[in-house]
């Protein structure tokens, strides 16, 4: 493991219970909506990369796909097995990094990855590996936080906030960079949109990552110092005493060409 992967594994091993029931990622309407019209039939082979506590994997298994849920962190995979048992779903679990997928070429109809690539040491290796393990005609679905193209100030602000909150955060990629990675690895981008997901309460968000008191102060001071364009970009505000904002979320669907 490289140092970035190691930091992510330590962070999520410690915090795995926080990502299970009650986490905002339990709402997987974004996944279902993204896959509408893609035409994958029940029984399709799906690999969910960096599955966390398994919310995306549960959604895919519920739709009738044969799901392998993978993650770097053993504690997270335990949460997936518990969650699958509670829901009566059959899901295979595998421990490995996103940057090296231990499957033969052309294994899956779908590779999904949601709210995780910003931790990866190499999103490029992840896309290359996803393209390799997809069958011809297979789909890559990526949903992750993003930053606007050509807006270095807004990018730097969110990067600092996320890094102080959770030092295992690596980098949010702008949409143009995702497009370049997919096209560079032979995938045809079919959809590249930005939607918004609410960060509902900064205190909850701090607790989720066990943010240190010093770093909480640093985040609060970045929030206090945010200028108008940044406040507008992320819809930063207060609701009944809670600090909230809206993350721009990339929704990317790319397809491996038929031979
Ligand atoms: C926020 S959780 C993912 C949420 C999940 N995909 C969902 O839809 O609910 C982030 C996950 O990424 C995993 N992760 C971070 N870096 C990774 C890497 N390089 N390879 C594989 N998994 C990684 C962490 O262990 C953690 O479980």
Image (cartoon, rainbow, N blue to C red):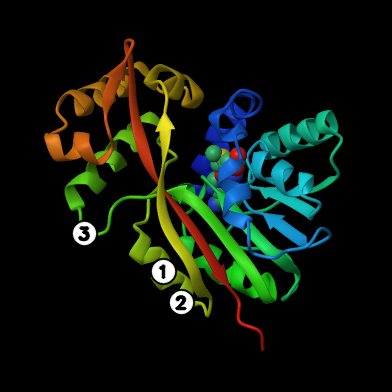
Q: Is residue 229 visible?
A: yes
Residue topped by disc 3: 150
Q: Are marks 1 and 2 in contact (CB under 8 Å)?
A: yes
Badge 3 or badge 1: first in the primary sequence: 3
Tag shown at residue 183: 2
Ligand 1 shows up in the quarter that is: top right
Tag shown at residue 179: 1
Residue shown at the point (80%, 36%) measured from the top left: 84
Residue 197, compared with residue 218, is above or below; it is below
Residue 155, compared with residue 214, is above or below; it is below
Between 122 and 40, the one nearer to me in the picture? 40
Q: Where is residue 148 shown, x and y percent of the image? A: 28, 53
Q: What crowding class fits label 3: few (fewer than 14 Cα within 10 Å), some (14-19), or many (20 or more)?
A: few
Between 26 and 42, the one nearer to me in the picture? 42
Residue shown at the point (34%, 24%) measured from the top left: 244
Horizontal side, residue 236 vs residue 59: left or right:
left
Distance between the Cα atoms at labels 1 and 2? 6 Å
Distance between the Cα atoms at labels 3 and 1? 15 Å
Q: Is residue 3 visible?
A: no
- Say which quadrant the C terminus sits in: bottom right
- Residue 12 found in image quarter: top right
Between 259 and 94, the one nearer to me in the picture? 259
């Amino acid at each position: 493991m490289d140092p970035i992967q190691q930091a992510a594994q330590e962070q999520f091993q410690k915090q795995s219970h926080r990502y299970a029931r009650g986490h905002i990622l339990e709402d997987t309407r974004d996944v279902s909506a993204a896959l509408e019209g893609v035409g994958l039939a029940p029984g399709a082979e799906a690999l969910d990369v960096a599955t966390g506590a398994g919310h995306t994997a549960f959604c895919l298994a519920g739709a009738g796909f044969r799901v392998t849920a993978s993650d770097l962190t053993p504690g997270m995979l335990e949460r997936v097995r518990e969650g699958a048992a509670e829901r009566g779903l059959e899901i295979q679990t595998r421990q490995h990094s996103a940057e090296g997928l231990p499957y033969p070429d052309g294994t899956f109809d779908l590779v999904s990855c949601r709210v995780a690539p910003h931790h990866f040491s190499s999103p490029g290796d992840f896309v290359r590996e996803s393209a390799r393990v997809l069958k011809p005609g297979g789909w890559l679905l990526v949903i992750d936080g993003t930053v606007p193209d050509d807006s270095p100030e807004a990018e730097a602000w969110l990067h600092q906030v996320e890094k102080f909150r959770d030092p295992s955060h690596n980098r949010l990629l702008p949409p143009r960079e995702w497009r370049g990675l997919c096209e560079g690895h032979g995938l045809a981008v079919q959809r590249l949109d930005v939607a918004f997901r609410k960060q509902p309460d900064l205190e909850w968000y701090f607790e989720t990552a066990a943010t240190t008191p010093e770093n909480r102060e640093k985040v609060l001071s970045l929030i206090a110092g945010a200028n108008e364009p940044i406040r507008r970009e992320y819809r930063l505000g207060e609701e009944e005493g809670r600090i909230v904002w809206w993350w721009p979320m990339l929704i990317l669907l790319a397809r491996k060409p038929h031979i």
